[in-house]
Image: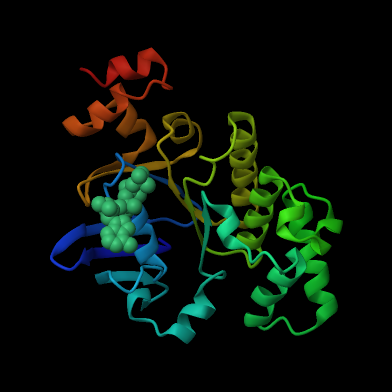
Amino acid sequence: MILSIKDLTVSHGEKTIVDHVSLTIDKGEWFALVGQSGSGKTMLSQAIGQLLGPNLRASGSVNYQESNILACSKTEMNQLRGKAISYIFQDYHGSFTPFLTIQQHMDEYLQTHGVKEKQKRNSMAKEALESVGLDAGFVKRYPFQLSGGQLQRASIALALLLEPDILVADEATTALDSVSAHRILSLLQELQQKTGCAILFITHDWRHVVRYSDKIAVMKDGKIIEVGTKQKLIHQPEHAYTKQLIQAAPTLPLRVREVSKS
Ligand SMILES: Nc1ncnc2c1ncn2[C@@H]1O[C@H](COP(=O)(O)OP(=O)(O)OP(=O)(O)O)[C@@H](O)[C@H]1O
């Protein structure tokens, strides 16, 4: 097990957004989190890396290597981000500052994690770009000089630069066309197999859930209502809401949707 979440609750004033969630994610696992819009998936994933805004409060524990991430200081968090846990978002533009080159973005990350020699940082940045199928020369470019798909690849290179144990991909391909989305997810799968990282994968697209995930958790109104292996959850869902979600997924083959009716 790489991450153990216990009784995680996120609230906004009196409102409970994530409600006593407990989950475990295993090393190298592709863990899909599904549920309708507003059910709390993003808030749950952001609480894990202490990314919640100041108006939100998180309680419970998120255990990673014997320590509770929720109790970590800012300095400790800076050391964990990128190395223990990394994020890629639907809005990948947000991962970049417009006036910094790709190299400068990677430098900042590498320096925070103690890579002192400039030459080493340069070669790591180039390798990272090549690993996502981009030309190493792109390190000199500014974010606006890359296309949407190229920038999303660069954001993956940045997120995987330090080979994190957990990668959170929150609707990471929603903004891309279906061919580009498939390419990005196949790339993630390839990099996952190479680095052994676990992926917490948030999506509305059941095609991607079926194709890539090992385990699935279903979230509703801030609670996890069902967790299981892909096989179990898709072919023998127990909860009525899970069955509804599967039946309502137009991208799934009819035979899969039919099974969930029984
Ligand atoms: N910064 C915030 N402050 C207060 N409430 C918030 C904040 N961000 C989100 N919420 C609320 O928290 C609830 C859960 O939102 P969240 O973004 O986690 O849902 P989600 O399941 O990821 O939805 P989607 O699939 O549409 O991305 C929603 O009711 C939302 O309005």
- State which quarter of the image contains the N terminus: bottom left
Coloration of the structure image? rainbow
Q: Is residue 75 above or below residue 234?
A: below
Q: Position of residue 145 (x, y in %)?
A: 77, 53
Residue visible at 48% across and 86% down? Answer: 75
Residue 225 visible here: yes
Residue 41 visible here: no
* Quadrant of the rendered image containing residue 50: bottom left
Front residue of 100/216: it is 100
Question: Residue most toward the left?
Answer: 14
Q: Position of residue 125 (x, y in %)?
A: 77, 65
Q: Position of residue 118 (x, y in %)?
A: 82, 80
Q: Position of residue 174 (x, y in %)?
A: 51, 40
* Quadrant of the rendered image containing residue 252: top left
Residue visible at 72% across and 55% down? Answer: 144
Residue visible at 59% across and 44% down? Answer: 189
241 displayed left or right of 109: left
Front residue of 11/59: it is 11
Residue visible at 60% across and 34% down? Answer: 182
Front residue of 156/99: it is 99
Q: Is residue 82 above or below residue 132?
A: below
